Image (tube, helix red, strand yellow):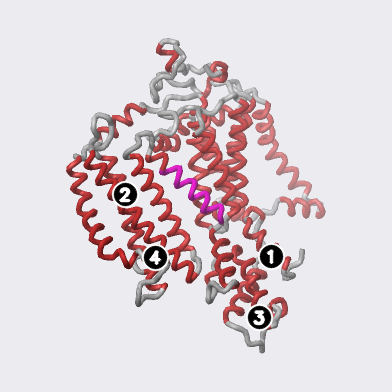
Amino acid sequence: MNETNDRNGSAFRDPAQTAGGSGAFAAPGAFAAPGAPADSSRVFSLAETVFAWLCLLFGYLFFRVFPLFDHPLGTAAVAICLYAVTLAVLLAEKKKPDGVLPILAFASAVVLSVACFLCGDSLLRFFSAAYAAVLYPFFLTAWNGHRLERGFSDLVFPDFVRALFTCPFASFRAVFSACRGGKKGSGVIGKAVVGLLIAVIPTVVVGSLLSYDEGFRKILGSIFTFTAADAVSQLFSILFGVLLGMYLFGAYLTSADKKQVGRTTAELCRDQAERARILPSITAVAAVLPLLFLYGVFFVSQWSYYVSAFRGVLPEGTVYSEYAREGFFQLCAVAALNFFLTALLLSFLKRREDGRPPVAVTAAATLLSLSTLILIATAVSKMALYIDAYGLTRLRVLSTWFMVVIALCTLIVAVGLFWKKIKPLPSCLAVAVVLFAALTLSSPDRLIADYNVEKYLDGTLKSVDVELLGDLGDDAIPALLRLADHWDEKNGTDVKTLLKDSSGVELPREYRLTMFRIAVRLDDPAPDLFERDLSYFLAEKALKDAGLKED
Protein backbone atom coordinates (compact mmCIF):
# COMPACT_ATOMS: atom_id res chain seq x y z
CA MET A 1 0.00 0.00 0.00
CA ASN A 2 1.12 3.53 -0.72
CA GLU A 3 3.14 4.90 2.22
CA THR A 4 1.55 8.32 1.89
CA ASN A 5 -1.94 6.93 2.21
CA ASP A 6 -0.90 4.99 5.35
CA ARG A 7 0.61 8.12 6.87
CA ASN A 8 -2.42 10.21 5.99
CA GLY A 9 -4.78 7.72 7.60
CA SER A 10 -6.63 7.12 4.35
CA ALA A 11 -9.39 4.53 4.50
CA PHE A 12 -8.63 3.47 0.92
CA ARG A 13 -7.59 -0.12 0.44
CA ASP A 14 -6.15 -1.74 -2.65
CA PRO A 15 -9.07 -3.62 -4.27
CA ALA A 16 -6.84 -6.65 -4.80
CA GLN A 17 -5.87 -6.76 -1.15
CA THR A 18 -9.45 -6.27 -0.08
CA ALA A 19 -10.51 -9.20 -2.21
CA GLY A 20 -8.09 -11.57 -0.58
CA GLY A 21 -4.68 -10.03 -0.24
CA SER A 22 -3.26 -11.68 -3.31
CA GLY A 23 -1.56 -8.48 -4.39
CA ALA A 24 -2.70 -8.89 -7.99
CA PHE A 25 -4.53 -6.15 -9.83
CA ALA A 26 -8.26 -6.09 -9.34
CA ALA A 27 -10.69 -5.69 -12.19
CA PRO A 28 -10.05 -2.38 -13.99
CA GLY A 29 -12.12 0.49 -12.71
CA ALA A 30 -13.42 -1.35 -9.64
CA PHE A 31 -13.09 1.09 -6.72
CA ALA A 32 -13.80 -0.87 -3.55
CA ALA A 33 -12.88 1.95 -1.18
CA PRO A 34 -15.60 3.59 0.89
CA GLY A 35 -13.91 6.94 0.29
CA ALA A 36 -10.99 9.02 1.53
CA PRO A 37 -11.02 10.69 4.91
CA ALA A 38 -12.50 14.10 5.40
CA ASP A 39 -10.13 16.94 4.51
CA SER A 40 -10.35 18.35 8.04
CA SER A 41 -8.80 15.17 9.46
CA ARG A 42 -6.09 14.75 6.85
CA VAL A 43 -2.50 15.54 7.83
CA PHE A 44 -0.67 17.35 5.04
CA SER A 45 3.04 17.11 4.45
CA LEU A 46 5.25 20.18 4.14
CA ALA A 47 5.45 19.66 0.35
CA GLU A 48 1.64 19.57 0.10
CA THR A 49 1.30 22.68 2.26
CA VAL A 50 3.73 24.60 0.06
CA PHE A 51 1.95 23.26 -3.01
CA ALA A 52 -1.43 24.47 -1.69
CA TRP A 53 -0.09 28.03 -1.43
CA LEU A 54 1.49 27.73 -4.86
CA CYS A 55 -1.84 26.58 -6.33
CA LEU A 56 -3.40 29.84 -5.12
CA LEU A 57 -0.46 31.72 -6.63
CA PHE A 58 -0.81 29.88 -9.95
CA GLY A 59 -4.52 30.66 -9.96
CA TYR A 60 -3.74 34.34 -9.53
CA LEU A 61 -1.02 34.30 -12.20
CA PHE A 62 -3.32 32.53 -14.65
CA PHE A 63 -5.70 35.47 -14.61
CA ARG A 64 -2.80 37.93 -14.78
CA VAL A 65 -1.76 36.45 -18.15
CA PHE A 66 -5.37 36.18 -19.38
CA PRO A 67 -6.31 36.25 -22.25
CA LEU A 68 -3.77 33.51 -22.91
CA PHE A 69 -3.04 34.32 -26.56
CA ASP A 70 -2.02 37.90 -25.71
CA HIS A 71 0.64 36.88 -23.16
CA PRO A 72 2.67 34.11 -24.80
CA LEU A 73 5.75 34.30 -22.57
CA GLY A 74 3.67 34.67 -19.40
CA THR A 75 1.35 31.81 -20.39
CA ALA A 76 4.25 29.49 -21.20
CA ALA A 77 6.04 30.36 -17.95
CA VAL A 78 2.97 29.82 -15.73
CA ALA A 79 2.02 26.52 -17.41
CA ILE A 80 5.54 25.07 -17.33
CA CYS A 81 6.05 26.10 -13.70
CA LEU A 82 2.72 24.57 -12.69
CA TYR A 83 3.54 21.23 -14.27
CA ALA A 84 7.12 21.28 -12.96
CA VAL A 85 6.06 22.09 -9.38
CA THR A 86 3.33 19.44 -9.51
CA LEU A 87 5.84 16.85 -10.72
CA ALA A 88 8.22 17.80 -7.89
CA VAL A 89 5.45 17.38 -5.30
CA LEU A 90 4.39 14.00 -6.72
CA LEU A 91 7.97 12.76 -6.57
CA ALA A 92 8.47 14.21 -3.08
CA GLU A 93 5.37 12.28 -1.96
CA LYS A 94 6.87 9.12 -3.54
CA LYS A 95 4.03 8.76 -6.01
CA LYS A 96 5.20 6.90 -9.10
CA PRO A 97 3.53 7.27 -12.51
CA ASP A 98 0.91 4.63 -13.26
CA GLY A 99 2.27 3.52 -16.61
CA VAL A 100 3.61 5.53 -19.53
CA LEU A 101 0.43 7.53 -20.29
CA PRO A 102 0.90 10.17 -17.53
CA ILE A 103 4.50 10.68 -18.68
CA LEU A 104 3.28 11.27 -22.25
CA ALA A 105 0.56 13.59 -20.96
CA PHE A 106 3.14 15.59 -18.98
CA ALA A 107 5.51 15.78 -21.97
CA SER A 108 2.78 16.87 -24.41
CA ALA A 109 1.52 19.57 -22.02
CA VAL A 110 5.03 20.97 -21.51
CA VAL A 111 5.79 20.89 -25.24
CA LEU A 112 2.60 22.76 -26.11
CA SER A 113 3.23 25.21 -23.26
CA VAL A 114 6.62 25.97 -24.82
CA ALA A 115 4.86 26.27 -28.20
CA CYS A 116 2.87 29.22 -26.79
CA PHE A 117 6.14 31.16 -26.78
CA LEU A 118 7.54 29.75 -30.03
CA CYS A 119 4.46 30.29 -32.22
CA GLY A 120 3.38 33.72 -33.43
CA ASP A 121 -0.17 32.72 -34.43
CA SER A 122 -2.55 33.81 -31.64
CA LEU A 123 -5.17 31.17 -32.49
CA LEU A 124 -2.67 28.30 -32.30
CA ARG A 125 -1.25 29.79 -29.11
CA PHE A 126 -4.72 29.79 -27.57
CA PHE A 127 -5.37 26.14 -28.40
CA SER A 128 -1.91 25.17 -27.14
CA ALA A 129 -2.52 26.92 -23.81
CA ALA A 130 -6.05 25.51 -23.59
CA TYR A 131 -4.70 21.99 -24.13
CA ALA A 132 -2.12 22.36 -21.35
CA ALA A 133 -4.78 23.80 -19.02
CA VAL A 134 -7.53 21.21 -19.49
CA LEU A 135 -5.07 18.30 -19.50
CA TYR A 136 -3.79 19.11 -16.00
CA PRO A 137 -6.50 17.26 -13.99
CA PHE A 138 -6.26 14.25 -16.33
CA PHE A 139 -2.48 14.22 -15.90
CA LEU A 140 -2.96 14.01 -12.11
CA THR A 141 -5.54 11.21 -12.25
CA ALA A 142 -3.40 9.27 -14.73
CA TRP A 143 -0.23 9.69 -12.67
CA ASN A 144 -1.89 8.53 -9.45
CA GLY A 145 -3.72 5.60 -11.08
CA HIS A 146 -7.14 7.07 -10.36
CA ARG A 147 -8.56 6.33 -13.81
CA LEU A 148 -11.41 4.00 -14.70
CA GLU A 149 -9.02 1.75 -16.58
CA ARG A 150 -5.24 1.62 -16.90
CA GLY A 151 -3.20 2.06 -20.06
CA PHE A 152 -4.33 3.35 -23.46
CA SER A 153 -7.96 2.60 -22.79
CA ASP A 154 -10.85 3.46 -25.06
CA LEU A 155 -12.48 4.91 -21.92
CA VAL A 156 -10.19 7.92 -22.16
CA PHE A 157 -13.11 10.28 -22.83
CA PRO A 158 -15.13 9.43 -19.67
CA ASP A 159 -11.83 9.44 -17.77
CA PHE A 160 -11.12 12.94 -19.04
CA VAL A 161 -14.62 14.24 -18.24
CA ARG A 162 -14.43 12.74 -14.76
CA ALA A 163 -11.00 14.26 -14.12
CA LEU A 164 -11.99 17.69 -15.42
CA PHE A 165 -15.49 18.15 -14.00
CA THR A 166 -15.84 15.81 -11.01
CA CYS A 167 -12.58 14.99 -9.22
CA PRO A 168 -11.43 18.57 -8.41
CA PHE A 169 -14.72 19.38 -6.68
CA ALA A 170 -14.52 16.33 -4.42
CA SER A 171 -11.74 18.17 -2.51
CA PHE A 172 -12.58 21.71 -3.54
CA ARG A 173 -12.12 23.33 -0.10
CA ALA A 174 -9.12 21.25 0.93
CA VAL A 175 -6.64 23.91 -0.14
CA PHE A 176 -7.43 25.98 2.98
CA SER A 177 -6.81 23.05 5.31
CA ALA A 178 -3.56 22.37 3.48
CA CYS A 179 -2.53 26.04 3.69
CA ARG A 180 -2.89 25.88 7.48
CA GLY A 181 -0.29 23.15 7.43
CA GLY A 182 -2.36 20.37 8.94
CA LYS A 183 -5.27 19.37 11.08
CA LYS A 184 -4.59 21.72 14.00
CA GLY A 185 -3.56 24.73 11.98
CA SER A 186 -0.06 24.75 13.42
CA GLY A 187 1.76 25.20 10.12
CA VAL A 188 4.55 27.74 10.03
CA ILE A 189 3.49 29.10 6.63
CA GLY A 190 -0.09 29.58 7.78
CA LYS A 191 1.03 31.47 10.88
CA ALA A 192 3.31 33.69 8.81
CA VAL A 193 0.54 34.56 6.37
CA VAL A 194 -1.87 35.37 9.20
CA GLY A 195 0.75 37.71 10.62
CA LEU A 196 1.17 39.43 7.28
CA LEU A 197 -2.59 39.89 6.97
CA ILE A 198 -2.73 41.39 10.47
CA ALA A 199 0.05 43.81 9.49
CA VAL A 200 -1.83 45.18 6.47
CA ILE A 201 -3.95 47.77 8.31
CA PRO A 202 -1.22 49.20 10.61
CA THR A 203 1.20 49.28 7.67
CA VAL A 204 -1.24 51.35 5.62
CA VAL A 205 -1.85 53.71 8.54
CA VAL A 206 1.87 54.19 9.23
CA GLY A 207 2.58 54.71 5.55
CA SER A 208 -0.06 57.44 5.31
CA LEU A 209 1.30 59.18 8.43
CA LEU A 210 4.87 59.15 7.13
CA SER A 211 3.78 60.49 3.76
CA TYR A 212 4.21 64.03 5.10
CA ASP A 213 7.80 63.70 3.82
CA GLU A 214 7.83 64.55 0.11
CA GLY A 215 10.75 62.28 -0.75
CA PHE A 216 9.21 59.32 1.06
CA ARG A 217 5.87 60.06 -0.63
CA LYS A 218 7.47 59.99 -4.08
CA ILE A 219 9.13 56.66 -3.35
CA LEU A 220 5.82 55.15 -2.24
CA GLY A 221 4.12 56.61 -5.29
CA SER A 222 6.65 54.99 -7.63
CA ILE A 223 6.16 51.61 -5.92
CA PHE A 224 2.39 51.62 -5.37
CA THR A 225 0.94 53.34 -8.42
CA PHE A 226 -2.53 51.95 -9.10
CA THR A 227 -5.33 53.26 -11.23
CA ALA A 228 -8.96 52.28 -10.70
CA ALA A 229 -8.67 49.86 -13.63
CA ASP A 230 -5.58 48.27 -12.07
CA ALA A 231 -7.39 47.83 -8.77
CA VAL A 232 -10.38 46.14 -10.46
CA SER A 233 -8.06 43.91 -12.49
CA GLN A 234 -6.12 42.86 -9.40
CA LEU A 235 -9.32 42.16 -7.48
CA PHE A 236 -10.62 40.05 -10.35
CA SER A 237 -7.36 38.09 -10.49
CA ILE A 238 -7.34 37.47 -6.73
CA LEU A 239 -10.96 36.37 -6.42
CA PHE A 240 -11.01 34.07 -9.43
CA GLY A 241 -7.43 33.01 -8.75
CA VAL A 242 -8.48 31.65 -5.36
CA LEU A 243 -11.26 29.62 -7.02
CA LEU A 244 -8.83 28.27 -9.59
CA GLY A 245 -6.30 27.47 -6.85
CA MET A 246 -9.01 25.52 -5.01
CA TYR A 247 -9.71 23.63 -8.24
CA LEU A 248 -6.04 22.81 -8.87
CA PHE A 249 -5.34 21.54 -5.37
CA GLY A 250 -8.65 19.68 -5.32
CA ALA A 251 -7.63 17.82 -8.49
CA TYR A 252 -4.34 16.87 -6.86
CA LEU A 253 -5.80 15.72 -3.55
CA THR A 254 -8.65 13.66 -5.01
CA SER A 255 -6.29 11.74 -7.27
CA ALA A 256 -3.52 11.44 -4.65
CA ASP A 257 -5.92 9.96 -2.07
CA LYS A 258 -7.85 8.02 -4.71
CA LYS A 259 -11.14 9.31 -3.40
CA GLN A 260 -14.17 7.50 -4.69
CA VAL A 261 -15.98 9.93 -6.96
CA GLY A 262 -19.47 8.97 -7.99
CA ARG A 263 -20.39 5.44 -8.98
CA THR A 264 -18.87 5.36 -12.45
CA THR A 265 -16.75 2.30 -13.20
CA ALA A 266 -15.17 0.83 -16.29
CA GLU A 267 -17.76 -1.94 -16.32
CA LEU A 268 -20.63 0.55 -16.15
CA CYS A 269 -19.19 2.62 -19.02
CA ARG A 270 -18.71 -0.46 -21.17
CA ASP A 271 -22.19 -1.69 -20.35
CA GLN A 272 -23.68 1.65 -21.41
CA ALA A 273 -21.59 1.65 -24.59
CA GLU A 274 -22.80 -1.87 -25.36
CA ARG A 275 -26.40 -0.81 -24.85
CA ALA A 276 -25.86 1.99 -27.35
CA ARG A 277 -24.94 -0.55 -30.04
CA ILE A 278 -28.42 -0.79 -31.51
CA LEU A 279 -27.60 -0.49 -35.22
CA PRO A 280 -28.14 -3.75 -37.16
CA SER A 281 -25.46 -4.68 -39.65
CA ILE A 282 -27.89 -4.58 -42.59
CA THR A 283 -28.77 -0.98 -41.70
CA ALA A 284 -25.11 0.02 -41.55
CA VAL A 285 -24.36 -1.58 -44.93
CA ALA A 286 -27.44 0.00 -46.47
CA ALA A 287 -26.32 3.42 -45.20
CA VAL A 288 -22.92 3.04 -46.86
CA LEU A 289 -23.82 1.43 -50.21
CA PRO A 290 -25.33 4.57 -51.87
CA LEU A 291 -22.18 6.52 -50.98
CA LEU A 292 -19.94 3.80 -52.39
CA PHE A 293 -21.97 3.83 -55.60
CA LEU A 294 -21.59 7.61 -55.91
CA TYR A 295 -17.83 7.40 -55.32
CA GLY A 296 -17.53 4.66 -57.92
CA VAL A 297 -19.27 6.77 -60.54
CA PHE A 298 -17.27 9.85 -59.53
CA PHE A 299 -13.87 8.12 -59.65
CA VAL A 300 -14.57 6.46 -63.00
CA SER A 301 -15.92 9.61 -64.67
CA GLN A 302 -13.38 12.05 -63.24
CA TRP A 303 -10.32 9.83 -62.90
CA SER A 304 -8.28 11.30 -65.75
CA TYR A 305 -9.07 14.85 -64.57
CA TYR A 306 -8.11 14.39 -60.92
CA VAL A 307 -5.22 12.01 -61.45
CA SER A 308 -3.43 14.81 -63.30
CA ALA A 309 -2.60 16.31 -59.92
CA PHE A 310 -0.48 13.25 -59.03
CA ARG A 311 1.51 13.63 -62.26
CA GLY A 312 1.91 17.39 -61.79
CA VAL A 313 0.33 17.96 -65.20
CA LEU A 314 -2.62 20.28 -65.76
CA PRO A 315 -5.62 18.99 -67.70
CA GLU A 316 -5.97 20.59 -71.11
CA GLY A 317 -7.69 23.97 -71.09
CA THR A 318 -7.17 24.76 -67.40
CA VAL A 319 -4.88 27.01 -65.38
CA TYR A 320 -3.27 26.37 -62.00
CA SER A 321 -5.60 28.56 -59.95
CA GLU A 322 -8.73 27.14 -61.56
CA TYR A 323 -7.61 23.50 -61.33
CA ALA A 324 -6.29 23.70 -57.76
CA ARG A 325 -9.24 25.60 -56.31
CA GLU A 326 -12.00 23.77 -58.14
CA GLY A 327 -13.54 21.23 -55.82
CA PHE A 328 -10.78 21.34 -53.19
CA PHE A 329 -12.92 22.34 -50.24
CA GLN A 330 -15.73 20.08 -51.44
CA LEU A 331 -13.28 17.16 -51.44
CA CYS A 332 -12.13 18.13 -47.93
CA ALA A 333 -15.72 18.28 -46.67
CA VAL A 334 -16.63 14.93 -48.22
CA ALA A 335 -13.50 13.27 -46.77
CA ALA A 336 -14.23 14.61 -43.28
CA LEU A 337 -17.88 13.54 -43.58
CA ASN A 338 -16.79 10.03 -44.59
CA PHE A 339 -14.49 9.71 -41.59
CA PHE A 340 -17.10 10.83 -39.06
CA LEU A 341 -19.80 8.70 -40.68
CA THR A 342 -17.57 5.61 -40.50
CA ALA A 343 -16.71 6.29 -36.85
CA LEU A 344 -20.39 6.90 -35.99
CA LEU A 345 -21.62 3.72 -37.66
CA LEU A 346 -18.95 1.58 -36.00
CA SER A 347 -19.74 3.13 -32.59
CA PHE A 348 -23.44 2.17 -32.72
CA LEU A 349 -23.08 -1.08 -34.65
CA LYS A 350 -24.13 -4.38 -33.09
CA ARG A 351 -21.05 -6.61 -32.81
CA ARG A 352 -20.53 -10.35 -33.01
CA GLU A 353 -19.81 -12.35 -29.89
CA ASP A 354 -16.07 -11.90 -30.38
CA GLY A 355 -16.53 -8.12 -30.44
CA ARG A 356 -15.73 -7.71 -34.14
CA PRO A 357 -18.04 -6.10 -36.74
CA PRO A 358 -19.82 -8.43 -39.18
CA VAL A 359 -17.89 -9.23 -42.37
CA ALA A 360 -20.25 -7.23 -44.59
CA VAL A 361 -19.86 -4.13 -42.43
CA THR A 362 -16.08 -4.59 -42.33
CA ALA A 363 -15.97 -4.71 -46.13
CA ALA A 364 -18.23 -1.67 -46.52
CA ALA A 365 -16.29 0.35 -43.93
CA THR A 366 -12.99 -0.60 -45.57
CA LEU A 367 -14.22 0.57 -48.99
CA LEU A 368 -15.52 3.80 -47.47
CA SER A 369 -12.16 4.39 -45.76
CA LEU A 370 -10.34 3.68 -49.02
CA SER A 371 -12.57 6.19 -50.83
CA THR A 372 -11.79 8.74 -48.12
CA LEU A 373 -8.04 8.24 -48.52
CA ILE A 374 -8.30 8.62 -52.31
CA LEU A 375 -10.28 11.85 -51.93
CA ILE A 376 -7.75 13.22 -49.44
CA ALA A 377 -4.79 12.26 -51.63
CA THR A 378 -6.45 14.02 -54.58
CA ALA A 379 -7.21 17.16 -52.57
CA VAL A 380 -3.68 17.35 -51.11
CA SER A 381 -2.04 16.83 -54.51
CA LYS A 382 -4.17 19.64 -55.98
CA MET A 383 -3.17 21.88 -53.09
CA ALA A 384 0.51 21.01 -53.63
CA LEU A 385 0.21 22.24 -57.22
CA TYR A 386 -1.47 25.43 -56.04
CA ILE A 387 1.21 26.09 -53.41
CA ASP A 388 3.97 25.43 -55.91
CA ALA A 389 2.48 28.04 -58.24
CA TYR A 390 1.23 30.69 -55.80
CA GLY A 391 2.96 30.11 -52.46
CA LEU A 392 1.64 29.51 -48.98
CA THR A 393 -1.18 31.12 -47.02
CA ARG A 394 -2.63 30.35 -43.61
CA LEU A 395 -5.69 28.74 -45.16
CA ARG A 396 -3.60 26.51 -47.43
CA VAL A 397 -1.39 25.37 -44.56
CA LEU A 398 -4.25 24.69 -42.13
CA SER A 399 -6.45 22.92 -44.69
CA THR A 400 -3.56 20.66 -45.73
CA TRP A 401 -2.79 19.91 -42.07
CA PHE A 402 -6.44 19.05 -41.45
CA MET A 403 -6.47 16.67 -44.39
CA VAL A 404 -3.37 14.88 -43.10
CA VAL A 405 -5.02 14.46 -39.68
CA ILE A 406 -8.20 13.03 -41.23
CA ALA A 407 -6.15 10.70 -43.45
CA LEU A 408 -4.17 9.23 -40.54
CA CYS A 409 -7.26 8.86 -38.37
CA THR A 410 -9.09 7.15 -41.23
CA LEU A 411 -6.16 4.77 -41.60
CA ILE A 412 -6.23 4.01 -37.86
CA VAL A 413 -9.97 3.22 -37.97
CA ALA A 414 -9.49 0.99 -41.04
CA VAL A 415 -6.62 -0.94 -39.45
CA GLY A 416 -8.65 -1.27 -36.25
CA LEU A 417 -11.26 -3.23 -38.20
CA PHE A 418 -8.74 -6.06 -38.66
CA TRP A 419 -6.40 -5.61 -35.67
CA LYS A 420 -8.28 -5.65 -32.39
CA LYS A 421 -5.32 -4.34 -30.37
CA ILE A 422 -5.73 -0.95 -32.03
CA LYS A 423 -7.79 1.41 -29.83
CA PRO A 424 -9.22 3.90 -32.37
CA LEU A 425 -10.23 6.72 -29.99
CA PRO A 426 -6.99 7.10 -27.97
CA SER A 427 -4.91 6.45 -31.11
CA CYS A 428 -6.71 9.16 -33.09
CA LEU A 429 -6.41 11.58 -30.16
CA ALA A 430 -2.68 10.86 -29.91
CA VAL A 431 -2.20 11.46 -33.65
CA ALA A 432 -4.15 14.74 -33.46
CA VAL A 433 -2.08 15.96 -30.49
CA VAL A 434 1.25 15.04 -32.11
CA LEU A 435 0.33 16.70 -35.42
CA PHE A 436 -1.01 19.78 -33.66
CA ALA A 437 2.22 20.08 -31.68
CA ALA A 438 4.20 19.75 -34.92
CA LEU A 439 2.05 22.45 -36.56
CA THR A 440 2.39 24.86 -33.63
CA LEU A 441 6.12 24.31 -33.11
CA SER A 442 6.76 24.95 -36.81
CA SER A 443 5.29 28.47 -36.36
CA PRO A 444 3.22 28.49 -39.59
CA ASP A 445 3.28 32.27 -40.05
CA ARG A 446 7.08 32.30 -40.03
CA LEU A 447 7.11 29.31 -42.36
CA ILE A 448 4.73 31.04 -44.78
CA ALA A 449 6.76 34.26 -44.86
CA ASP A 450 10.11 32.49 -45.32
CA TYR A 451 8.77 30.11 -47.98
CA ASN A 452 7.12 32.80 -50.11
CA VAL A 453 10.08 35.19 -50.01
CA GLU A 454 12.66 32.47 -50.69
CA LYS A 455 10.63 31.11 -53.61
CA TYR A 456 10.27 34.62 -54.99
CA LEU A 457 13.99 35.35 -54.66
CA ASP A 458 15.00 32.12 -56.41
CA GLY A 459 12.51 32.79 -59.24
CA THR A 460 10.04 29.99 -58.46
CA LEU A 461 7.23 32.44 -57.66
CA LYS A 462 6.56 35.25 -60.14
CA SER A 463 5.33 37.65 -57.47
CA VAL A 464 5.09 37.95 -53.71
CA ASP A 465 2.02 39.17 -51.82
CA VAL A 466 3.47 41.78 -49.45
CA GLU A 467 0.04 42.61 -48.02
CA LEU A 468 -0.36 38.97 -46.98
CA LEU A 469 3.12 38.99 -45.41
CA GLY A 470 2.29 42.17 -43.53
CA ASP A 471 -0.70 40.45 -41.92
CA LEU A 472 1.64 37.84 -40.42
CA GLY A 473 3.05 40.33 -37.91
CA ASP A 474 6.52 39.90 -36.42
CA ASP A 475 6.96 36.52 -38.12
CA ALA A 476 7.24 38.30 -41.48
CA ILE A 477 9.77 41.01 -40.48
CA PRO A 478 12.97 38.99 -41.20
CA ALA A 479 11.54 37.90 -44.57
CA LEU A 480 10.47 41.47 -45.43
CA LEU A 481 13.96 42.71 -44.66
CA ARG A 482 15.44 40.11 -47.04
CA LEU A 483 12.94 41.29 -49.63
CA ALA A 484 13.97 44.91 -49.05
CA ASP A 485 17.66 43.97 -49.49
CA HIS A 486 16.78 42.29 -52.80
CA TRP A 487 14.98 45.36 -54.11
CA ASP A 488 17.73 47.66 -52.84
CA GLU A 489 20.25 45.68 -54.86
CA LYS A 490 17.95 45.62 -57.88
CA ASN A 491 17.00 49.33 -57.84
CA GLY A 492 20.17 50.82 -56.39
CA THR A 493 18.31 52.16 -53.35
CA ASP A 494 18.76 51.96 -49.59
CA VAL A 495 15.76 51.08 -47.47
CA LYS A 496 17.28 52.78 -44.39
CA THR A 497 17.38 56.09 -46.26
CA LEU A 498 14.02 55.63 -47.94
CA LEU A 499 12.29 54.90 -44.65
CA LYS A 500 13.05 58.52 -43.72
CA ASP A 501 12.24 60.10 -47.09
CA SER A 502 11.02 58.32 -50.21
CA SER A 503 9.52 61.39 -51.92
CA GLY A 504 10.52 61.84 -55.50
CA VAL A 505 11.71 58.25 -55.85
CA GLU A 506 9.82 55.98 -58.24
CA LEU A 507 9.59 52.53 -56.65
CA PRO A 508 7.53 49.41 -57.28
CA ARG A 509 4.34 49.14 -55.26
CA GLU A 510 5.62 45.99 -53.53
CA TYR A 511 8.74 47.86 -52.38
CA ARG A 512 6.67 50.71 -50.94
CA LEU A 513 4.42 48.23 -49.12
CA THR A 514 7.48 46.48 -47.73
CA MET A 515 8.89 49.77 -46.41
CA PHE A 516 5.51 50.67 -44.97
CA ARG A 517 5.27 47.40 -43.03
CA ILE A 518 8.82 47.80 -41.72
CA ALA A 519 8.14 51.41 -40.73
CA VAL A 520 4.97 50.41 -38.87
CA ARG A 521 6.92 47.76 -36.97
CA LEU A 522 9.62 50.29 -36.03
CA ASP A 523 6.97 52.69 -34.68
CA ASP A 524 5.14 50.06 -32.62
CA PRO A 525 5.72 50.43 -28.86
CA ALA A 526 7.54 47.55 -27.22
CA PRO A 527 5.11 45.13 -25.55
CA ASP A 528 5.37 44.12 -21.91
CA LEU A 529 7.79 41.29 -21.16
CA PHE A 530 5.08 38.62 -20.75
CA GLU A 531 3.44 39.71 -24.02
CA ARG A 532 6.55 38.89 -26.03
CA ASP A 533 7.22 35.71 -27.97
CA LEU A 534 10.00 34.26 -30.09
CA SER A 535 8.68 36.08 -33.17
CA TYR A 536 9.17 39.42 -31.39
CA PHE A 537 12.78 38.62 -30.47
CA LEU A 538 13.61 37.37 -33.99
CA ALA A 539 12.08 40.51 -35.51
CA GLU A 540 14.09 42.70 -33.12
CA LYS A 541 17.30 40.88 -34.02
CA ALA A 542 16.61 41.22 -37.76
CA LEU A 543 15.95 44.97 -37.42
CA LYS A 544 19.15 45.46 -35.40
CA ASP A 545 21.20 43.39 -37.88
CA ALA A 546 19.84 45.60 -40.66
CA GLY A 547 20.93 48.72 -38.77
CA LEU A 548 17.36 49.98 -38.38
CA LYS A 549 17.35 49.74 -34.57
CA GLU A 550 20.01 50.33 -31.97
CA ASP A 551 21.11 47.59 -29.58
Q: Amino acid at mark 2?
A: Ser
- Total labels drawn: 4
- Eye-nearest disc, 4 or 1: 4
The residue labelled by disc 2 is 369
Q: Amino acid at mark 1?
A: Ala
User: Label 2 to label 3, Cα distance in Å?
Assistant: 52 Å
The residue carrying pointer 3 sits among few (fewer than 14), some (14 to 19) or many (20 or more) residues within 10 Å by Cα, namely few
Secondary element at image label 4: helix
Q: Residue furthest bottom?
A: 504
N-terminal label among 2 and 1: 2
User: Label 1 to label 3, Cα distance in Å?
Assistant: 21 Å
Disc 4 + disc 1, Cβ < 8 Å: no
**What's the mark number on residue 490?**
3
14 or 56, which lies in front? 14
The stretch in magenta equals 428-442
Image coordinates of residue 274 in percent, x first then y, are 27, 33
The residue labelled by disc 4 is 309
Image coordinates of residue 475 in percent, x first then y, are 60, 63
N-terminal label among 2 and 3: 2
Magenta highlight: main SS: helix
The residue labelled by disc 1 is 542
